[in-house]
Amino acid sequence: MKKLMFVFIFAFAFAAFSQNKILPKNIQIKTAVLAAPEMYRDGATVLGYNEEGKLTTLREGTNKMVCLADDPNREGISVACYGAELEPFMARGRALAAEGKSNEEKREIRKNEIDTGTLKMPEEPSILYILAGEEKDYNTETGELLNGKIRYVVYKPYMTGESTGLPTKPQAPGMPWLMDAGTHRSHIMITPAN
């Protein structure tokens, strides 16, 4: 009986803790848009988490920027913003993850869909802004993040080192380089030196 009571108390405490990890809508929005350039923040669409922990649209936007709130089930703080043209690619990745697909499976499925034209990618390069930090530097009451680090990712399928003139491995702090060169998910990585 004691074991059953312990299991019940533990389950109740875990459920309460999980629900408390979901921040209020206004705080999720305030933090999510920190990754975007200031000129896009007020009009960005923001995706975040409802009380049940499901990803949902917290705010409809008026421009073509989409921001993603911090995932409460992952360690640290990480928010991202990107052009709306990347949303089909990003949404498909989230859907495949929800289906339990591995990273390798997700890559293969999205590659096939891009190659057959069923998954549209931007014709022009499209940027992803990522702001990350530690939980100890995050104020859950104000949505402010101290000591956050930003990085930039520019997507365009099938870029190569030769076509861009970029190295395909990191060369120096802050120097752009091309990751996944020659693939459907090729992207330019720019991580400012800290």
Image (tube, rainbow, N blue to C red):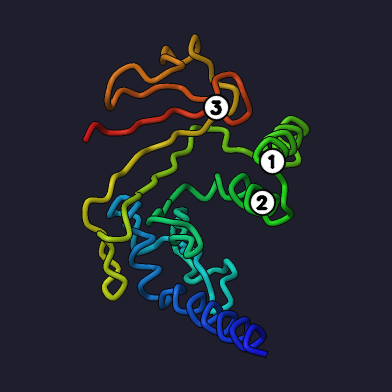
Label located before the other in sequence (3 or 1) = 1
Q: Position of residue 70 (x, y in %)?
A: 44, 60
In the picture of the structure, the residue carrying the numbered disc 2 is: 97
Quadrant in which the N terminus is drawn: bottom right
Structural crowding at the residue carrying mark 2, measured as other residues with C-alpha within 10 Å and reported as few (<14), some (14–19) or many (≥20): some
Cα distance between the residues tagged 3 and 1: 15 Å
| Mark 3 or 1: the one toward you | 1
In the picture of the structure, the residue carrying the numbered disc 3 is: 186
110 vs 151, left or right, is right
156 vs 76, left or right, is right
Structural crowding at the residue carrying mark 3, measured as other residues with C-alpha within 10 Å and reported as few (<14), some (14–19) or many (≥20): some
Cα distance between the residues tagged 2 and 1: 7 Å
Q: Position of residue 131 (x, y in %)?
A: 35, 49
Q: Residue at x 66, y 51 (%)?
A: 97
- Type of the residue with mark 2: Ala
Q: Secondary structure at mark 3?
A: loop
Reply above or below: 56 against 98. Answer: below
Quadrant in which the C terminus is drawn: top left
183 vs 14, left or right, is right
Q: 72 and 33: which one is in front?
A: 72
Q: Secondary structure at mark 2?
A: helix
**Quadrant assignment, res 108:** top right
Is mark 2 in CB contact (under 8 Å) with mark 1? Answer: yes
**Quadrant assignment, res 69:** bottom left
In the picture of the structure, the residue carrying the numbered disc 1 is: 106
